[in-house]
Amino acid sequence: MLEKSRGLIVDCVAYDLEDSVTPSRKSEARSNVRHFLDQPRAAGIKEQSVRINAVESGLALDDLTEVLKARHVDTIVVPKVNSAADLHFVTDVIRHSRQPSSAVGEKSTSIQVLALIESAKALSSLSSICTATPLLSGLIFAAEDFALDLSLTRTPALTEFLYARSAIVTACRAHDLPSAIDLVCTAYKGEEGQRALQEECLGGRGLGFNGKQCIHPSQVDITQSAFAPGQKEVEWAVRVTVADAKAAKLGRGAWTLEGKMIDAPVVGKAKATVRKAAACGFDIKALEKKWKEQEPE
């Protein structure tokens, strides 16, 4: 299973030491993941992460001690983060384990942290969680455990999670965390599963999430396509940025494009779209050349 993941083309793969590993196999799993992440990086995987066991489980220290020895671990995913104290613990262990090396030519590897939000307590502590450590790069919504904690029944519309999802996205934006990762789509087989995934992706993007957890390789293409900007969206954003540069030289803070008012918030969104499109592989230089004559109206 570990080796199969090397063939994926994804932003991030999370290797699990928590729910998918029985208590009797924890030690073996740690060792397996550690040695697996000592291999050269797979070309299609941008980020390699490990989901450790929750701090409250008493297993997190052993998990961290082992996996932080790996050469190519980028991110630690911390489940069941209920307070800032959970992230303080993880950060202390990371800093102790990854102190700068004195060996010539060696550098300490920067480790990021992603926090899973899974309970009412976590939701009420979002502000302190978001400011708990400079290593934190984002929040992930764990819907199933959240539903268990609040005795909710998950429905296709996901309205029972609206408050929690909105709160998580808002907290990420308020604290400049780059990653807001939405819930898992538990349906993935057949056309019905693909439709459900597509709807969830679009709904999550509409709420402000910029990524989604996948539990099966068949979910990757749909998810990436849904969260990436479309061709027309990117072209529009490029036209806005090109014209805005000209408008700025003319001292025009607001102008129009195809009858639509363009002001600072619209330009800001366009610039963000262009950055995201570049990360998704769009040829921005070619589009800028195509629309170089675009003028503010």
Image (spheres, rainbow, N blue to C red):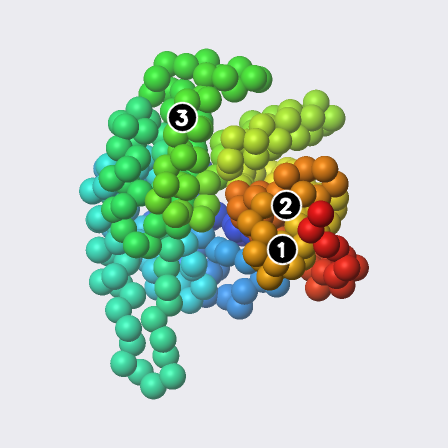
285 lies above or below 10: below
Residue at position x 22%, y 62% in the image: 96
Q: Amino acid at mark 2?
A: Trp
Residue 63 coordinates in the image, percent (x, y): 32, 51
Point out the tag, 2 or 3, that comes first from the N-terminus. Answer: 3
Whether the residues at callouts 2 and 1 have beta carbons within 8 Å, the answer is yes
Residue at position x 24%, y 56% in the image: 93
Q: Which mark is residue 247?
A: 1
Is 258 situated left or right of 186 in this image?
Answer: right
Q: How many dots with numbers?
A: 3
Q: Quadrant of residue 83?
A: top left
Residue 214 coordinates in the image, percent (x, y): 56, 38
136 lies above or below 68: above
134 lies above or below 84: below
User: What crowding class fits label 2: few (fewer than 14 Cα within 10 Å), some (14-19), or many (20 or more)?
Assistant: some
* Residue position marked by numbered label 3 in the rendering: 164
User: What crowding class fits label 1: few (fewer than 14 Cα within 10 Å), some (14-19), or many (20 or more)?
Assistant: some
Q: Amino acid at mark 3?
A: Ala
Residue lying at the far front of the rendered structure: 251
Is 292 situated left or right of 146 in this image?
Answer: right
* Residue position marked by numbered label 2 in the rendering: 255
Residue at position x 28%, y 58% in the image: 94
